């Protein structure tokens, strides 16, 4: 993997299908995780080509941008500064959030509609917050923060990206049901109307190897 | 210039010093502007190397990411969705904002401090808004929106970038004093405390050619 020049901020991740045991060049300060794909569930929009159960997935994280280069299923994103978490919620989440977990890992790439991206910041923000009618994205997520490790990679402004976000989770076996509850709550428009703007979404369930 | 793969969103710009009349390969859907550099004013932090009065600057805008490649003064950024403009202010600005202007163009690359990037969204947002004590960034900018064309390129998460933002302006000769007023108001901590987080800033004054 050719390493690129550092940027001012961010942690980049690239996910791609590889062969078990393949050696790879990792950018300075980077690390690799490998997974066995267990299941692929299309939730909305076009399926992902090239990812099937039994395959090996790699995640390379590094402080430098990693251009997509002819990967079988390649997806790239960057951890940026937070956009929808206020200071109080951030303190709360910092105090309770799970660290890395295992053995399960789930990658859910997501694309939202043009209507989402056309909104102003306050309009988008409102969808994340609690209202008298429903909990919203942030409060639903907070309920599961103690048990499920999560990382959000922004993908909308990456070359060759088909996705707006790569959402990534790690969890223990015994939290699998809780994780499914989290996903179904986020997708319920009565609880979280934000999800009506998701137009493409696939779950890739994996086990760390 | 090698063109890159499209992303889901964004308009990329690359600024670099070139020779007058040099032909260049422009990415599909892209365009080039050329400028003569008139003056370079360091406002804070380290000076920019390689840009001097009399040189020719190019701006290449395209819907695809443009990696920096051994340019003399190269800076790259992307127009993203808006982060600090609420729906009402956005409607107001859309109704009054100047289109492209000339013959003057001013590029002001900016880097903010780690303290800025460590804040939560609501904390950063507060610095942009009016309060009883001062107008803040958005209101100061709105006063000049009718006469000065502005474009904000996000640069923090671009490979090889030394900057967080490339701010770009176009104006008529007769609006030069108004533009200087805009800059001095934005830099006045009593009027706009946000600017205390700017730790590197240089003005590159140019004329369109």
Image (cartoon, coloured by chain):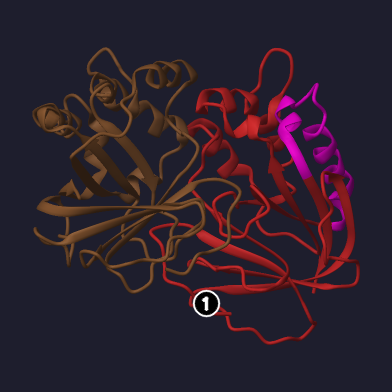
Chain colours: A red, B brown
A148 is within the stretch colored magenta: no
Query: Image check: A67 left or right of A114?
Result: left
As displayed, is residue A103 above or below residue B143? below
**Image coordinates for residue B118, horizontal then vertical, percent:** 41, 45
Question: How many numbered markers are drawn?
Answer: 1
Q: Quadrant of the N terminus of chain A?
A: bottom right
Depth check, front residue: B124 or A163:
A163
Q: Quadrant of the C terminus of chain A?
A: bottom right
**Image coordinates for residue A85, horizontal then vertical, percent:** 54, 35
A184 is within the stretch colored magenta: yes
**Image coordinates for residue A83, horizontal then vertical, percent:** 52, 38
Q: Chain of mark 1?
A: A
Please report the residue visible at 81 percent of the width from the left and 50 percent of the height from the top. A202
Depth check, front residue: A196 or B53:
B53
- How many residues crowd around disc 1 within 10 Å: few (fewer than 14), some, or many (20 or more)? many
Q: Label 1 belongs to which residue?
A: A27
Please report the residue visible at 15 percent of the width from the left and 60 percent of the height from the top. B47
Q: Quadrant of residue B129?
A: top left
Magenta-colored span: A173-200
């Amino acid at each position: 993997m050719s390493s690129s020049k550092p940027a001012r901020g961010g942690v980049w991740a690239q996910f791609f299908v590889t062969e078990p045991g393949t050696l790879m060049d990792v950018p300075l300060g980077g690390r690799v995780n490998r997974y066995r794909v267990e299941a692929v569930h299309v939730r909305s929009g076009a399926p992902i080509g090239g990812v099937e159960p039994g395959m090996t997935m790699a995640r390379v994280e590094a402080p430098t941008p990693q251009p997509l280069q002819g990967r079988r299923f390649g997806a790239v994103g960057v951890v940026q500064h937070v956009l929808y978490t206020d200071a109080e919620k951030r303190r709360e989440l910092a105090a309770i959030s799970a660290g890395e977990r295992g053995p399960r890992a789930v990658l859910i790439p997501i694309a939202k509609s043009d209507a989402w991206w056309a909104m102003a910041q306050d309009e988008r923000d409102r969808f994340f917050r609690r209202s008298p009618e429903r909990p919203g994205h942030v409060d639903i997520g907070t309920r599961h923060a103690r048990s499920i490790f999560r990382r959000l990679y922004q993908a909308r402004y990456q070359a060759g990206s088909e996705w707006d976000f790569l959402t990534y989770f790690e969890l223990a076996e015994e939290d699998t049901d809780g994780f499914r509850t989290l996903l179904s709550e986020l997708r319920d428009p009565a609880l979280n109307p934000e999800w009506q703007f998701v137009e493409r979404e696939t779950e890739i369930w994996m086990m760390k190897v």
